[in-house]
Image: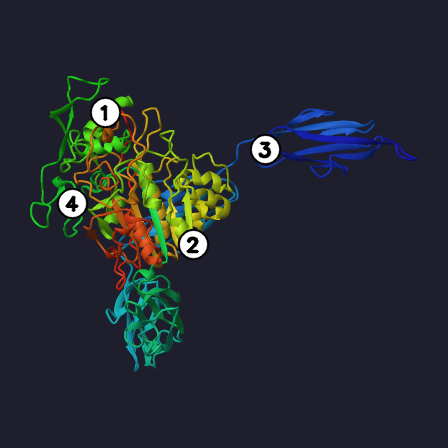
Amino acid sequence: MKGPGESTFQLAVTSSGTGTGSITSSPAGINCGTACMATFSAGASITLTATPASNSTFTGWTGGCSGTSTCSLTMNAAASVGAIFAASAATTYQLTVTNSGTGTGSVASSPAGINCPTTCVAGFAPGTAVTLTATPAPNSTFAGWTGACSGTSTCSVTMNAAASVGAMFTAGAPPTYQLTVTASGTGTGSVTSSPAGINCGTACVAGYAAGTAVTLTAAPAPNSTFAGWTGACSGTSTCSVTINAATSVGATFSTAAPLTYALTVTNSGTGTGSVTSSPAGISCGTTCTASYAAGTAVTLTAVPTANAATFGGWTGACSGTSTCSVTINAATSVGATFTAGSGISLINHVIILTQENRSLDSHLGQLRQYWAQNGIADQSFDGLPQFNPATGAAPLKGPPPSNPSCNPSDPAPSDCIWDTSTTVTSFHLSTVCTENTSPSWDEAHNDWYPFDNTGNNPSLNNGFVYTAAYDGRANDFFDSDGQRAMGYYDGDDLNFLYFMATKFATSDRWFQPAMSRTNINREYLLGATSGGYAYPNGTSSADTPQLTSKTIFEDLQDAGISWRIYVNPTGTGCSGPPYEASCLIQTSYLSNFAYAQTVVSTYPQNVQPISQYMTDLQNGTLAQVSYIAPASDAGLDEHGTDSDSDDPTNVQSGEVYVESLINALMNSSSWNSSALFWTYDESGGLYDHVSPQQMPSPDGIKPKDLLAGDICLTSTGPTCDFTWTGYRIPLVVVSPFAKQNYVDHTVADYTAMLKFIETRWNLPALNARDAAQQDMTEFFDFNNPPWLTPPTPPAQNTSNPCYLDHLP
């Protein structure tokens, strides 16, 4: 390239290859990688020199030069030259360590490589800084380094060439010298050392090897201060001495008045109560401020005024509802909240949670054995007789119950032929998924006794296997002989239920309201009647679209009591969120009543997805009455599996669902004023040994939808009316006021939960059935609530197998 008035040419240099390096020119101009192109005068003689980087080699020129020496060229035209560099293995230098002397020891390096006497030679990259540490063996001392290092501390070598280091060890332990510490003054305290040895007043003399650096720390006792060191140390901080001779140190402690701080307790809320302290000092409302020495641990106990208030919890330095423990190291304030009320009026939130199709014997029949296994005192509970003790409270131990089954000579698909010589005895179920056993009107009456199924004689409860077999054959179930009806679960399978039934209150005389299936009993749950229906409304073409009977929600609405229905939307087909009340209500069973139309049009906010229940607990916005509809479409209701082609319904999954709902309540701010009733809508055709019980007809309406061939059309009897309950079901009353480990023996059907709500808010009975029930206050201790701090339940076991194709 020519410039104005002179001739010049451009020289371009490039580098390539697996390695790196630089190219420079003489005369100056090229300095790659700074400048790889320069202009030189025509005729100039240029010499290029290639210098490889560390770990690279120069392998030759290309273009205007060749070979591996310098490149010389004359600039008579533009020129290009290439330099090739190749990567080469890194150079290392050997470090050699030699141990010598009359003693023994080891030398280790950082970075790793040397671990002499095992590994005494190692290679290190150039420039590596290596630190060697000598460690003498017991009864040896390190005498010093030779070679590339000296002295007795660590040895540091930078590896720019091969190096040798010697480590000398001398036999014999180093000399020891005594360190003596003396405490004095008007106060008291302790002195400790690091490394250990001194712990005054336990040990005030200790021996240390020559050269040991010892740090002493003085700690004054309460009511004392540390005044300072004497002897080998001074001042009031820690004392550091290196022991090369016998050494003495003094620690002086002086008496001092203890620091005291005020603890202030303030009572608040709509109720009254008292707070006392241990140690004494606080006695609110007498003395709400007291002074305590610094470091004092104070326990505060709150006691609400009997029959007039409950303790709502601590604020300030404490929280929760148990005792308050504070250590006084500064002025401290604690608040105690008391809520006014007495008896049942202390309950401000009622939650009804009903699962599906489980009898008391099938779900809680092993309860007395569970108590024995867990060291819990026995009491009367009428579960399966094989789990009762031989002595003690009645009922006592008896043989496992059994039911007649089908004649083996008439296997499926033929009808089950009653055979008293072939029986099925109560047994433990391993699978937590079973085929459904029908609880419908005819089946429930056959469970009483197939040859007296309308109740002219006392119940024998011996038709459960027969009806399960009949239903199993009609549905082409694997279990065509009805054996599943006699299965039960124990306290390992349903550990959450057994724990809660033990800690809180339960009953062994708690019945489903009607001798029929889910729809009918759910109508009793919401309105204390099925309006004369023995079968689900709509079974007959003559059925009215919906019941006109009043429900508990209408009474609550009229009285200004807040209420909500929570529905799990999973599997319902309801789109959301947000979810429409008109869709959610279809799976709540309130849809069986005409009042549902009013709710959807006027009070849609009262029907919410189950997620809102959790939100209401978190936000303290729980309604006064809540009904949690069964999560049937989500497969979490514990119902038997309706078809072998369906996904099996897992009982333990249903229990986990219940666990999540109850734990959320127990951990919420609503807990202290709540009562949750956990029960099942009906026994589901599963065996229970206790007879149904007589009850008043709700409204005098007799069954009006019996089908052709119905038992009560071919034979009449007492149970062909709504004047009998169905079979027993489990109940757990979960509340801070629920009596601890309490078993109620009063006959009731679960319209008693309606009676409880009516009693709490002074509502009229819906009809004769709920009016006849106990008000359930006997399940509670409102004067001395046992569970203001709820127990911690075990996580529900989910390890049992789930199958339908065999038993158990």
User: In the rendered structure, which disc, 2 or 4, sits on the residue that comes first in sequence?
Assistant: 4
689 or 7: nearer the eye?
Answer: 689
Q: Which residue is mark 3?
A: 56
Nearest-to-viewer mark from 1 and 2: 2
State the mark number for residue 382. Answer: 4
Circle 1 Cα neighbour tier, 10 Å, few/some/many (<14 / 14–19 / ≥20): many
User: In the rendered structure, which disc, 1 or 4, sits on the residue that comes first in sequence?
Assistant: 4
Pointer 1 and pointer 2: residues touching (CB < 8 Å)?
Answer: no
Q: Amino acid at mark 2?
A: Asp
Examine the image and state in which quarter residue 345 appears: bottom left
Examine the image and state in which quarter residue 88 appears: top right
Where 200 sits versus 120, above or below?
Answer: below
Circle 4 Cα neighbour tier, 10 Å, few/some/many (<14 / 14–19 / ≥20): many
User: In the rendered structure, which disc, 3 or 1, sits on the residue that comes first in sequence?
Assistant: 3
Where 159 sits versus 217, above or below?
Answer: above
User: In the rendered structure, which disc, 3 or 4, sits on the residue that comes first in sequence?
Assistant: 3
Separation of residues labelled 3 and 1 (CA atoms) = 90 Å
8 or 449: nearer the eye?
Answer: 449
Q: Which residue is mark 1?
A: 470
Q: Amino acid at mark 1?
A: Tyr
Separation of residues labelled 1 and 4 (CA atoms) = 29 Å
Nearest-to-viewer mark from 3 and 4: 4
Q: Which residue is mark 2?
A: 558
Separation of residues labelled 3 and 4 (CA atoms) = 91 Å
Q: Position of residue 242 (x, y in %)?
A: 36, 66
